[in-house]
Amino acid sequence: MDFKVISFYKYIELENPESFRNLLREFCLEKDIFGRILIGKEGINGAVSGSKEAIEAFKSKLIEDQKFSDLTFREQEVQSKTYHKLVVRVRNEIVALGVNANMKNKGNHITPEELKEMLDNEEDLVILDARNDYEYKVGKFKKAVTLPIESFKELPSKIKDIEHLKDKKIVMYCTGGVRCEKSSAFLKEQGFKDVNQLKGGIIDYLNKVGPAHYEGSCFVFDNRLGVDMGEPVTECEHCQKPCGTYINCHNLDCDKLFVNCDECKKTTKNCSEECKNASRQRPQPEKPKRYVGTITNYFVKSKIAEAKLVKPLIENTKISIEGNTTNLEQEIKELKFHENEGLVTFPVTERVRRNDKLVLVE
């Protein structure tokens, strides 16, 4: 896979979040990185996606700042970018709990390996899910205690539901760690005596120890809407077959998250017949273009194009050559490689121009 998605966070006092926002936004635009980054005086919380090279450069850019030299990343390889735009914003909270929580009171970190061992040994502890109801609906740790919340801001008002657990050993978890870190501090301030948090969240747990003690999929806040971790615990809302994949209803006036299997997606991407017949439907996204090179020269008499490749190209491959005044689609019948690395020539049926782009036709 040529792309990565990473998530990261750190609670740390930042004096000038606006300046830091501008720096990160410019870097992401330069490297063609999409995602969502929230910056505030309490720290940074983000998830971004791009080519492997761009993401490695982004990580290096962050950790070259001494304040973030110990930053850790939750990483996954993906087929394409998992976000369709870039958002970098300054917020009062990098994750909105809505109440003050002193981060010096945060719960102890427990590694994925340590949690697995605890669960293997059936230790007396409570696994507490700090996520929203639509997230844990499609997957959670087995025997986890869940809270009936639709947003993180509702969590403080639901703590009364678990006051009987104040003397128990609690291990909180969320997708990547940022929510349970803040809510663990809040719980300790409410009198919970032994509060811990899963370091790196579900994503790190999956990466390091696999799906042991977890059931279903893991909801994520990007275009994927979920990562498979095992057998589904939910059913497709159309055919009732086991499925753990959400999509948004394509009726723009509904936009409801619902479970829809791959087979049913072929016939409908709406949650109901009423929504299927609605006039305002979500436009179908175009498949991402796979650029393989750039035209560097065109020989008029022989009708030969010269190109500099950035990705491999072989004969009998169908390509599109695109430019301001060029729109040519053809199959590469003959391909000649030259001594200069990445430089090739091939016959074309029409005139092409320098700087036109070569795109693979799927």
Image: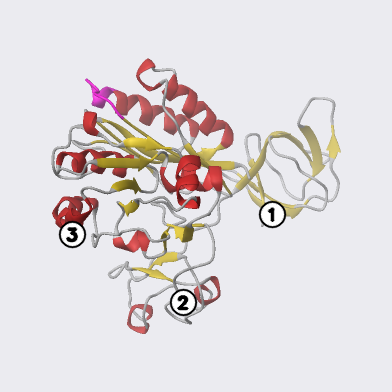
Residue position marked by numbered label 1 in the rendering: 329
- Place of residue 143 in the rendered image (x, y in percent of width and height, measured from the top left): 38, 61
Q: Nearer the viewer, mark 3 or mark 1?
A: 3
| Magenta span includes 16 | yes
Location of the N terminus (image quadrant): top right
For image coordinates 25% across by 26% down, the residue present is: 17
Q: 174 or 352: nearer the eye?
A: 174
- Place of residue 189 in the rendered image (x, y in percent of width and height, measured from the top left): 16, 39
For image coordinates 79% across by 50% down, the residue present is: 332
Q: Nearer the viewer, mark 2 or mark 1?
A: 2
Highlighted magenta segment, given as a residue range: 11-19
Location of the C terminus (image quadrant): bottom right
The amino acid type of the residue labelled 2 equals: Thr
Residue position marked by numbered label 2 in the rendering: 268
Relative to residue 60, is residue 349 drawn left or right?
A: right
Q: 160 or 310: nearer the eye?
A: 160
Q: In the drawing, what numbered circle is on residue 161?
A: 3
Mark 1, other Cα within 10 Å: few <14 / some 14–19 / many ≥20: some
Alpha-carbon span between mark 2 and mark 1: 31 Å
Mark 3, other Cα within 10 Å: few <14 / some 14–19 / many ≥20: few
